[in-house]
Image: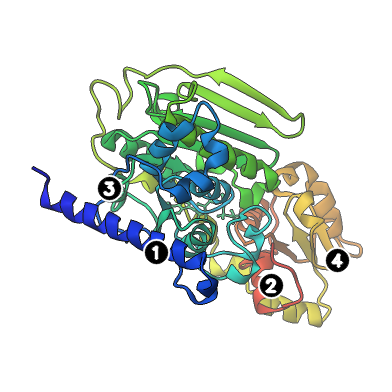
Amino acid sequence: MAHPADVLAELHTLRAENATLRARLASSSPKAATAPSPAHPPPVGVPFTQKTRLSNEEISRFSRQLLVPEIGVQGQLKLRNASVLVVGAGGLGAPAVMYLAAAGIGRIGIIDYDVVEASNLQRQIIHDESRVGMLKSESAKQTVSKLSSLCECTAYNILIDSSNAMDVIKKWDYVVDATDNVATRYLLNDCCIFRNKPLISGSALRMDGQLTVYNLEGGPCYRCIFPKPPPPETVTNCSDGGVLGVVPGIIGCLQALEVVKIVTGIGASLSQKLLIFDATTMSFRTIRLRGRTPSCAVCGPHPTITKPIDYVQFCGAGPDDKAHNINILPPESRISCHKYAALRLDAFPHVLLDVRDKIQYDICSLHHSLNIPLSELPKRIPELTAAATFGEHHEPNLPVFVVCRRGNDSQLAVKMLEETHGFTHVKDIVGGLEAWARGRDPTFPIY
Ligand SMILES: Nc1ncnc2c1ncn2[C@@H]1O[C@H](COP(=O)(O)OP(=O)(O)OP(=O)(O)O)[C@@H](O)[C@H]1O
């Protein structure tokens, strides 16, 4: 006998199909302009009924895909009955979500805690100018509903972490990692092992991209390959290192393709393989990864981690660290951008040292600044000493104010100049050029 919940769900689906049919009939009549819009799929929370046949609407819509021998009706039904959770509605998530919805995945969940910024639009094509300031998850959901009324889309405006990941992930068949930080990668990996879900993982930076699938067909998990996180200071993200927009676009599309292939059972997946894309040479390379590691702390036969841990502590950095400034200097070694602006107005003699990389310095800079990137500072001390030495003195006698993009590297530079190179009149400009732009000079760009 059918479970009452199944009967209810079946009833709901029949009603929805009826409504769709009615709407389609109405739209083919002269009254189309005033006809109600087609019914949307059942709201989230209603059990998802597996479909065994395609509607005429689906046949028309997916006809080009149905004609592909590897897909056919059976493949399309598998897509229709599948659910995919995409974590991150950024550079990777944007194309992944759009192609999954367009391909006919029945249910898509989109997680993101952030809002759309102007600097996202160069690659996050699921958002547009009118969405700047809007929650990314909501913006992505709106694009999906415009693209396809057949896709049931759930937006989660959350930062996925140890407190919520297990509950969210259990509701979905496949998980796409479209995030940009190591802590979330370990979190998703572990929870996908605990919940036994395949994890389709992508990354992109500058001109390079990578793609693999974890926890599928007995293949390894992320921890099998990377048992320990990299030191946080060695990790670069798009915000600092930059990214050519098409590159995550390609990797996000490939993530969607990998999902479609896995769901429909086409060909070989990237389980135990890593695809490496180099846009400069336009080359794709696939390298073989080692299999499951017997000593793996989560998927090995004797796991030591059996539930989500504190991933920010484990990795030494969290998902939103770019928003947090370090604070390693005493107040007397720092100056606010307002006080520094007043000194500039008074033409107070000093050196303004900008420690950003040249590529950032070329984007924008304050007049009369000396650019010595932090990484080159130790070997270019004589240049700084010469700039800070005025008149007959043989020692630096001018104060040095240090600036960077957000006020972190400048603090490291001040510490280095004081502790290692004997500078005594050196101060960090708090919050860097971003604080300058926000607090002092609205015409100065933020990037
Ligand atoms: N733990 C998390 N929970 C929810 N969303 C996350 C989490 N970690 C990362 N994200 C989201 O993943 C997306 C990654 O996108 P992307 O790599 O393009 O970077 P971005 O943060 O949008 O841009 P930029 O680094 O240039 O400021 C972001 O929208 C981010 O908010």
Q: Nearer the viewer, mark 1 or mark 4?
A: 1
Residue that protrudes farthest toward the front in the picture: 30
For this view, does 158 lie left or right of residue 261?
A: left
Q: Amino acid at mark 3?
A: Thr
For this view, does 385 lie left or right of residue 146?
A: right
Q: Residue at x 11, y 52 (%)?
A: 4
Q: Secondary structure at mark 2?
A: helix
Q: Amino acid at mark 1?
A: Arg
Q: Nearer the viewer, mark 1 or mark 2?
A: 1
Spatial CA distance of label 1 from label 3 is 21 Å
Q: Nearer the viewer, mark 4 or mark 2?
A: 2
For this view, does 130 lie left or right of residue 365?
A: left
Q: Residue at x 61, y 58 (%)?
A: 411
The mark that comes first in sequence, 1 or 4, is 1
The mark that comes first in sequence, 1 or 3, is 1
Q: Which residue is mark 3?
A: 49
The mark that comes first in sequence, 3 or 4, is 3
Tell me residue 390's x, y (percent).
Answer: 88, 64
Residue that protrudes farthest toward the right in the picture: 392
Q: Which residue is mark 4?
A: 368
Q: Which residue is mark 2?
A: 436
Question: Is there a contact, CB below 8 Å, between mark 1 and mark 3?
Answer: no
* Dot 3 alpha-carbon crowd within 10 angstroms: few under 14, some 14 to 19, many 20 or more: some
